[in-house]
Image (cartoon, helix red, strand yellow):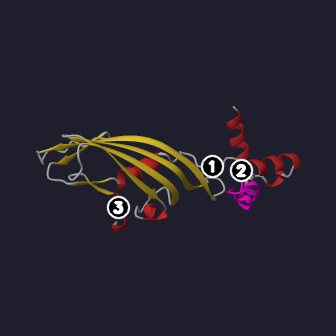
Amino acid sequence: MKSLQEYRIPFTGLKEGKHQFDFDIDQRFFNEFEYSLVKNGTLKVDLELEKQETMLILQFVIKGEILLGCDVCLADFPVGVDKKERQIVKFNDDENLEDDTDEIIVLGRNEHEIDVSSLIYEYINLAVPYINRCENPGDTQWCDKEMLDKLEKLSVNQTEGEAAENNENTDADPRWDALKKIKNK
């Protein structure tokens, strides 16, 4: 976590108003998070911190590319990220009051800096799609053609289709025929 020191912003010495911070995100950043969905990428984070008397307003603009593993061929491929997020940080004198929410972080009046690394990490992970697939399987430089060929050979649908075409169904287990009858009903 020592390499994440650059993501700590000391706000006590800042005047009220807007302040700009820029961060470069690469593999070193993702290595600091043990179970990260993203292992590598090149991103630029533009952070506008607006300091007010009772709160901070953080506006994040994250742009760049992350590398994800394809769910089909297992090869790494780039995914573009263009994300804008806002986070509000309020100050509170009561140390017993902890009402952090997704939109509001509560800091004590005696705190003098905020660590934005976890926020950046969360926003990047929110940009990861649920299903990771190469855009044109087999046609791109990122796709693993050998893996797709192996999957094609081992495909259940293809082996069933070939068996039906070639009438090689003589060694079939009769229990499968009973299951197929149930499926067709």
Q: Position of residue 6 (x, y in %)?
A: 35, 61
Q: Amino acid at mark 3?
A: Glu
Is 166 on the left or on the right of 92, as rendered?
A: right
Foreground label between 2 and 3: 3
Q: Are marks 1 and 2 in contact (CB under 8 Å)?
A: yes
Q: Position of residue 56 (x, y in %)?
A: 26, 43
Q: Is residue 172 rendered magenta in the image?
A: no
Residue range (magenta) = 140-154
Is 29 on the left or on the right of 99, as rendered?
A: right
Q: Where on the picture, by quarter, is residue 48?
A: top left
Label disc, if present, on residue 23 of the rendered structure: none
Q: Circle 2 is placed at which residue position?
A: 137
Q: Circle 1 is placed at which residue position?
A: 133
Residue located at (23% from left, 43% from top): 16
- 26 and 94: which one is in front? 26
Residue located at (21% from left, 53% from top): 13
* Mark 3 or mark 1, earlier in chain: 3
Label 1: few (<14), some or many (≥20) within 10 Å? many
**Considering the image in quadrants, where does the N terminus appear?**
bottom left
Q: Amino acid at mark 2?
A: Pro
Residue located at (45% from left, 65% from top): 28
Q: Circle 3 is placed at which residue position?
A: 6
